[in-house]
Amino acid sequence: MKLTDVLDGTRIAAGGLKDFAKGIVHPTLRLGVTGLSRSGKTVFITALVHALLKSARLPVFEAHARGRITRCYFEPQPDDDLPRFTYENHLEALTGEQRRWPESTRRISQLRLTIEYEPQGLIARNLHGGKLHLDIIDYPGEWLLDLPLMSQSYAQWSAGTVAASRKTPRSTHARDWHEYLVALDSSAPADEQKALKASELFTGYLSRCRQDDVSLSTLPPGRFLMPGDLAGSPALSFAPLDVTPQYLPEAGSLAALMARRYDAYVSKIVKPFYFGHFARLDRQIVLVDVLSALNAGPAAVSDLKAALSATMSSFRIGANSIASNIFGRRVERVLFAATKADLLHHTSHNRLENILRVLVEDATHRADFTGATHDVAALAAIRATREATITRKGEDLACIVGTPQAGEEIGGLNFDGTGEAAIFPGDLPEDATAALDGSLEGQLKFVRFRPPLVKDTTFPHVRLDRAIEFLIGDRFA
């Protein structure tokens, strides 16, 4: 066993012991919310918190439906080194005069919601009186895809990344970077300007792979596409070189410079996130934009499936015990949620869930063998549409109705963001595996709708209550 493995295990145990000591008197549940870019993380958290604060109708959330939730309120978050999730700003964006979807998650943030309830168990009544701290940790899914880097050398990562970039459809978007890569000599003396140029072109390649018409998912390093305060730092100024997995950089060479910065990225950015926050989660929801991948084609679907498998390989998964509570908690419940279900008629929701089950089959297989509980759901944390049936040429079409965002276009019709429209999005196939072969490419018609108009009320949703019950319902005994 490597010394670094021992030290890493010690860091996990230290965090677990600290959380265990606090949790005896003040029960806390740490819920991780993640998903790749534009999967709906910010909307989900805002909707979940708003529903609990405002006592929305949540029939499947049993403790709430039975009236056992007596009070919900904010308290200061426990981790002073994390930004607060700006719930109030996101709610204003959704409900303001120019109602719009809030800005996407670009960094980790946290929010503590305390839930008071009528306890049923003797221990709960006498020890903490029916109070649960729900700590919600919001973080970009792209950061999850960085975690495998902790077990890869720079040469291994370089070789794998370059090899993947030479396959369709990535190769089309890597041309500029590839042209520059050919001219780079890994054994040449270190050159700052060459490193910066390579990093710039590599980042451009990653960005193009993420565009709507491509929708690839496996694009580490995650901070390259959302650098935040790290923009321009040496830790983000590296790129792969065309080397073998066994390559050993010579001292003072360009490859040595790249490797040093790669190692700094892993040690100063990836590991602090993993040991400080990720390894301390109790529950996890992974939001997945299945519809965009289906619309982009088989390459996007295949890449999404690979990304989900890589995601699960990074979780500390399994049923918790006294030992794990003390020496490092495990994620004991994972919910995979296909978001934006309101862009489909409800008759396709079960089909959407089945497609997601196929996508996460490899990922959930690992969870099955470690005692973790997982589920799959099609949901819309905030429902932007309603349903209607329209008859056209003697055929009944199951449509959705809402207000398309300004600039959206379908069938040659441009929307200005003010009027409603009824849209037939298409049907998902009954056979989930048939949806993954590329036959749906361009067949589904998705339009971005504005948030629903609500005043002094709660947001409509699709299965938000089911998600809440699965993720935290068992803690209200």
Image (cartoon, rainbow, N blue to C red):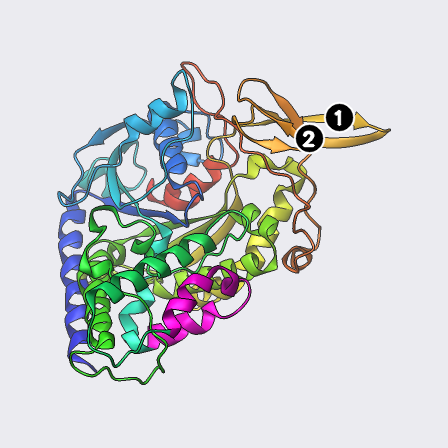
For numbered disc 1, what is the local secondary structure? strand
For label 2, the residue is 399
The label on residue 108 is: none
Magenta span has 165?
yes
Residue 228 appears in the picture as rendered: yes
Residue at the (51%, 30%) spot, across then down: 383
User: Label 1 crowding class (10 Å Cα cut-off): few <14, some 14-19, many 20+?
Assistant: some
Residue 331 appears in the picture as rendered: no
Q: On the rendered structure, is 55 left or right of 270?
A: right
Residue 66 image position (x, y, % from top left): 42, 29
Toward which corner of the image does residue 470 lie, by quadrant? top left
Toward which corner of the image does residue 436 lie, by quadrant? bottom right
The label on residue 390 is: 1
Q: The N terminus appears in which quarter of the rendering?
A: bottom left
Task: Kindly report the distance in space between the C-alpha atoms of the residues bearing marks 2 and 1.
Answer: 7 Å
Residue 450 image position (x, y, % from top left): 50, 26
Magenta-colored span: 156-182
Evaluate if marks 2 and 1 touch, with contact meaning CB atoms under 8 Å apart. Answer: yes
Residue 57 image position (x, y, % from top left): 46, 25
